[in-house]
Image (spheres, grey):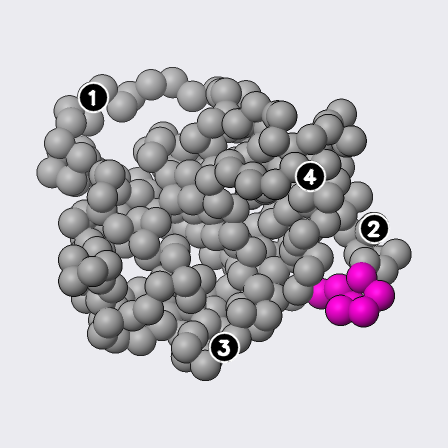
Amino acid sequence: MIDRTRQVVEFEAVDVAYRNRDVLRDVSFEISAGERIALVGPNGAGKSSLLRALAGLVPVRHGRISLDRHPIETLGRPAIARLISAVPAASLPFSMRVEEVVALGRLPHEDPIRGLRPSDRAVVAHAIDRVGLGHLLGRDARELSLGERQLVLLALAVAQEAPLMLLDEPTVHLDLRHQVETMDLLVDLNERDGTTVVAVLHDLALAAHFFPRVLVLNRGRLVADGPAREVLSPALVREVFGVDPELLRVARP
């Protein structure tokens, strides 16, 4: 049973800068265990920077980030990897078979001397089956389409079995059917497994349909936080994204 009152993430007045250029300004929010959150905003709003700060990949200039009630700067990379899985852009620098890429998700858990145990291999097989990649086994992951590679990296994150999953535009290279299937998988991981999910999305319709809570960033600041129906109002869409909200009224399956 998930203790949904337990805070797993806390941002307290966080500022982040790259080469003296502010990318996050005075950002404060909390995430409780078992939440499913979409992070939206225009290009350059700071969404990816927020995920990188949450994963401990960029330093905080001011403020504080806590992960599982520990200041993130006190946690080493192995500890963070056991708490957070991340689905990055579909880039694979080395030639590896699909199952080898997915098995990288077990690195935070495997025996440093003996390597993968039978239990680890079972988790990898389960992740491959859950994401629906069985037909790609044995393939060089670099030879796959961008959408297929994105699914392989999602399976890697599933195999990691971390309580918090971060996704940066997980549907960007996927066709409509795979977008919906990926969203359904994230809902299942969240509701059945209790995984806390935070996903950067550009598609506001997907964010509104599949995520109970939406955070809106604009110019490095958190400008809205709450239920999708309240947050993604016509006035906010017009102000933050600079488009007519009527253009977004597209039927979804």
Quadrant of the image for the N terminus? bottom right
Height in image: 109 above or below 166? below
| CB atoms of marks 1 and 4 within 8 Å | no
| Discs 4/2, front | 4
Secondary structure of residue under mark 1: helix
Height in image: 170 above or below 111? above
Secondary structure of residue under mark 4: loop
Name the residue located 81 percent from the left edge and 58 percent from the top edge: 116
Q: State the residue position of label 4.
A: 96
| Discs 3/4, front | 4
Q: State the residue position of label 2.
A: 122
Residue 182 falls left or right of residue 239: right
Q: Quadrant of residue 42?
A: top left
> Which contiguous range is marked in magenta?
109-115
Along the polypeptide, which appears first: circle 4 or circle 2? Answer: 4
Secondary structure of residue under mark 3: loop
Secondary structure character of the magenta stretch overall: loop
Q: State the residue position of label 1.
A: 246
Secondary structure of residue under mark 2: helix
Residue 176 falls left or right of residue 60: right
In the rendered image, residue 223 lying in the magenta stretch gets the answer no
| Discs 1/4, front | 4
| Discs 1/3, front | 3
Q: Amino acid at mark 1?
A: Glu
Q: Amino acid at mark 4?
A: Met
Name the residue located 85 percent from the left edge and 60 percent from the top edge: 117
Residue 113 percent coordinates (x, y): 81, 69
Name the residue located 76 percent from the left edge and 69 percent from the top edge: 112
